[in-house]
Amino acid sequence: MAHLPPKFAVKLGLQVVALISFTLLAGCGSSVDPKRAIVGTWQVGDTAEWVFNADGTSVQKMLKDGKESKGTYKIIDGDKIDMTSESGGHVVQSQYRFDGNDRLIILMGVSERPTRISEAAGATGPRLHGKGGGIIVKLSRKG
């Protein structure tokens, strides 16, 4: 077996470690399944709780009076979600995005699906883009 010069061996070893680390990190980021990541209990400030179940059902509960609204949801194309309530049956076409592992932002369209959200600086806060307007709901994972 041939011996490598010490400087070269150290340099090669560091490159191999860096390559393995990068490969592992890249694999972790791409393996997140939004259909599984959304499952759980989420809280909207101190006003409401939203539970997304693995079977596509959901429950929204108002924390002050305990009223509940049941419905369903369906993840579409990675960043789109359609939601219905049991009482109304109307499909609310929405978009969503995760902000880390414990924050979820849902853009609920009024007449059609919003196209995107932008974070505005200053007092105006986030803005929806698209026709028909909508509602921005910011949720934190309860846990």
Image (tube, rainbow, N blue to C red):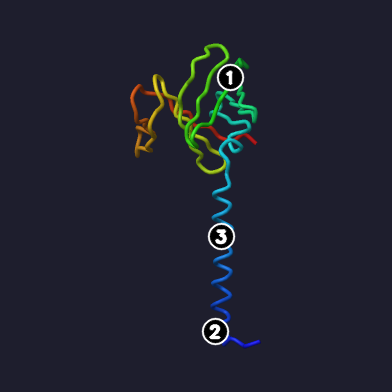
Mark 2 or 1 closer to N-term?
2
Q: Amino acid at mark 2?
A: Lys
Q: Which residue lies at the image location 54% right of the left edge and 78% below the top edge?
A: 11
From what the image shows, is residue 126 above or below residue 15?
Answer: above
**Which secondary structure, mark 1?**
strand
- Disc 1 packing (10 Å; few <14; some 14–19; many ≥20): some
On the rendered image, what quadrant is the C terminus found in?
top right
Three-letter amino acid code at the position of disc 1: Gly
- Is 115 on the left-hand or right-hand side of 91? left
The residue positioned 57% from the left and 87% from the top of the image is: 5
Answer with left or right where residue 80 lies relative to residue 42: left
Mark whose residue sits in front, 3 or 2: 3
Q: Position of residue 40 (x, y in %)?
A: 63, 32
Residue at mark 3 to residue at mark 1: CA–CA distance: 40 Å
Query: How far apart are the two marked residues, 3 and 2, measured between alpha carbons?
Result: 24 Å
Q: Amino acid at mark 3?
A: Thr
Q: Quadrant of residue 128?
A: top left
Q: Are marks 3 and 1 in contact (CB under 8 Å)?
A: no
- Asked which secondary structure carries label 2, the reply is helix
Residue tagged 1: 71
Contact, mark 2 vs mark 1 (Cβ under 8 Å) = no
Category of crowding for the residue at label 3, using alpha-carbon neighbours closer than 10 angstroms: few (below 14), some (14–19), many (at least 20): few
Q: Which mark is residue 120?
A: none
Disc 2 marks which residue? 7
**Residue for point 61% across, 22% down:** 59
Asked if the residue under mark 2 is in contact with the one under mark 3, i.e. CB atoms within 8 Å, the reply is no
Could you tell me residue 58's position as x and y percent? Answer: 60, 24
Q: Residue at x 66, y 87 (%)?
A: 1
Left or right: 84 with respect to 51?
Answer: left
Give residue 23's mark: 3
Marks 2 and 1 sit apart, C-alpha to C-alpha, by 63 Å
